[in-house]
Image: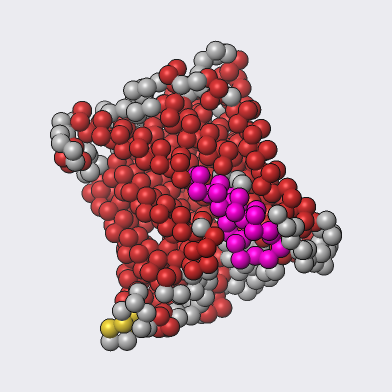
Amino acid sequence: MTFVDEFPGEAKLVRWHFGVSFVALALGGLFGILQGLYRTGYFRDALPINATEYYAVLTAHGVLLALVFTTFFICGMFVWAVTRSLDRPLASGRLAWAGFLSMLLGTVLAATAILNTFVPALPFEDSAVLYTFYSPLKAHPAFYVGAALLIVGSWVVGGDYFLTFREWRKDNPDSRIPLQTFMVLTTFIMWYLATLGVAVEVVFFLIPWSFGWIETVDPLLTRTLFWFFGHPVVYFWLLPGYVAWYTILPKLSGGRLLSDPLARVVFVLFVLLSTPVGFHHQYIDPGIADGFKAIAMTNTMMLLLPSLLTAFTVVASMEHGARQRGGEGYFGWLRALPWDEPAFAGMALAGLMFAAGGFSGMINAGMNINYLIHNTVWVPGHFHLTVGTAFALTAMATTYWLFPQLTGKRLQHRTLAMIQPYLWFVGMALMSNAMHRGGLAGLPRRTAEPLFQDAGGSPFETVVGGVSEIQFQIAIGATLLFTSLVLFLIVVLGTWLSRPRIGELRVNGSLPEPLSGADDGPRVLDNLALWAGIAVLLVVLAYGVPLWGMVENGLLEPGASPIPV
């Protein structure tokens, strides 16, 4: 039996989450190619946007992909993971659907406010405030209310995971938490903690400010509250990818996960270290003492540990599978892996690209060298490797494996599905490489004008016949990425609309037991309350004094002096 046969209600809920997620992905990808071509100057006069509308395109691209696509896909995937691993339906289907509807309403409100730039008849002011929505840019209240509803909806859906786990625990008081459920719960502990910052920013400051109920807000305070959330959200994107890499990828490789306890250690470390790092986005901000920026830098560097542990565990698990398939030699086992399987290829290539993103992330985290690349195209080059590939390509690959289990239908257009991950990988390699090099040359981000000519004569730039090589590489990379996205959507839509055939072979959704099981690790790893408490303490130590320095002269008064450390 497949998942849809055992849990039809939950399968329907996951399909709806995925459906909204893929609509956001399609629209965000369309805005992405418009942005890429306009910024690089290709077909600029033929594109249906101007310099003013470019910023609405940029905002829609960021919000739809980084917040809407990710949140809906993650919440849907986690419904599957919890239900499958606990082998029971959700505790409250109504609660989960209520959360979904809240997220959907919030998405419609926020997207409508952004797209008002293109449809002046809509009753909203311009809300092109970019993905990083903090003051002094002000959006229409609908944008902020929509953002709040999206976050609250995710809280509600997440609450159903914990309720389901509580019911399971009553029936299994002495059992270890199943690995996928453990990963889901720890991810949402981090999510609940991290989103407190943006919730306070939006509800207590930006919504009243946008309605005119208060006249001013403190830009430093709202910026800090946003980045309290803005970097942990990277791990909210990343950890579902880890769920797939730890539990699905070993099966696709033909083997088993190396170590269940090591996977739990990784997720505990992310719970503890994800949130106290936001100040590394504010190295150039006045009003924050350098000592607290150094704490954020240290915490960020410590997050390399769970990523390196993941690289070791996942690659070792893949090697085990390859050797079960007959692979031999130090590196010859790589040829035994199923590179012609879309789900495997997508996850493996996403992991490889994430390794490159980790190296550029170390540059972002360092206080001294961050000044070199801050607010240059290096930064979008980096996060297109993380959310744009480590998450997005893993989500697509997971869909190839999971969607037949949610629909009871065979994956359609398999040849397109096989090509799609490689096309995405090549497109992202070109675009991100050019962005990183352009950042080193000083090319700014968040501007409508190309500005690539300003890097002429730089050792990082080649100009041939008046055409910037970096400019051309970004345009080609963006085009390949959009083409890959179209292929993915064709496969998904074709599968969704196809009819199941009698006697059709379905995907086996079972997952093999790890080589080293949960009982090989200490039971304290399952003490979620302990790790949540320590995480809160670390946040208080990292943020308590700086936040007090910002508000001691008044919550709405800008210009607080930094507290020396």
Q: Is residue 358 left or right of residue 329?
A: right
Residue 507 visible in the displayed image:
no
Q: Quadrant of the N terminus?
A: top left
Q: Find residue 554 and report its image quarter.
A: bottom right
Query: What x and y, as percent, mark residue 140?
Result: 70, 65
Q: Please give the name of the residue rendered at 45% of the width and 17% of the height, measured from the top-left corner.
A: 519
496 vs 284: above or below = above
Query: What x and y, as percent, mark residue 556?
Result: 81, 62
Q: Find residue 487 and report its image quarter.
A: bottom left
Count of marks overlaid on the render: 0
Q: Please give the name of the residue rendered at 64% of the width and 28% of the height, measured from the top-left corner.
A: 529
Work out whether residue 151 or residue 179 is closer to the camera in this orientation and state it.
179
Q: Please give the name of the residue rendered at 56% of the width and 38% of the height, measured from the top-left corner.
A: 271
Query: What x and y, as percent, mark residue 360?
Result: 42, 57
Q: Find residue 285 and report its image quarter.
A: bottom right
Q: Is residue 293 left or right of residue 545?
A: left
Q: Quadrant of the C terminus?
A: bottom right
397 vs 134: above or below = above
Magenta segment includes 294: yes
232 vs 89: above or below = below
Q: Which residue is outermost to the bottom?
A: 465
Q: Please give the name of the residue rendered at 48% of the width and 23% of the height, measured from the top-left corner.
A: 178
Q: Which residue is outermost to the front?
A: 565
Which residues are drawn in magenta? 277-303
